[in-house]
Amino acid sequence: MQKRASRYVPVEHTADAGIKIFAPDLKGVFESAAQGLFDLIANLDRVTPTSRRQIEIEATDREALLVTWLSELNYLFLTERVIFKKFQITTLDECALSALVAGEPLDLEKHEIYTEVKAVTYHGLYVKEADDGCEAQVIFDL
């Protein structure tokens, strides 16, 4: 059976924003979820990924790992003012991941910011195997 390409689509949600992610594998889910988070935050066409960073996280299961991953990226955006555009999961299992991310320092004269994500929530969260790959859903508190 042919696996589907990675992508995400918006999920309608009252007062918050969400995405549903489809990917050929779990790595693709995590990479696409990160892309979806930053597409929600800013116009990524204006971001040049000039700096790279290694990120390593752990959690109790893959749903918590997805929340922790996205929360870490959002934390780095909010506190260090770095906007990320490229995401490569280098290792991944049920409870840990290592990734290489690339972006650049936030420049309000260059970057168009759409919204601030306050938190990545567990509401409506799932990560599951599908017939043609993996899928997930995540809701963001705006």
Image: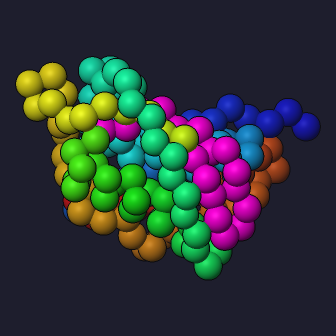
The foreground one among 46 and 135 is 46
Whole-percent x, y for residue 125 in the image:
51, 68
Dominant secondary structure of the residues highlighted in magenta in the image: strand
The residue stretch that appears in magenta: 83-99
What residue appears at the point 54 percent right and 41 percent down from the top-left corner?
100
Q: Does the magenta stretch include residue 89?
A: yes
Task: Tell me where residue 129 appears, x and y as whole percent.
Answer: 76, 58
The quadrant in which the C terminus is found is bottom left
Q: Could you tell me residue 11's position as x and y percent?
A: 42, 52
Residue 108 at least partly seen: yes
In magenta segment, residue 101: no
On the question of residue 9 being in view, the answer is: no
The image shows residue 96, relative to residue 80, as above or below, that is below
In the picture, residue 95 is in which quadrant? bottom right
Please state if 47 lies on the left or on the right of 97 as rendered.
left
Asked which quadrant contains residue 51, the reply is top left
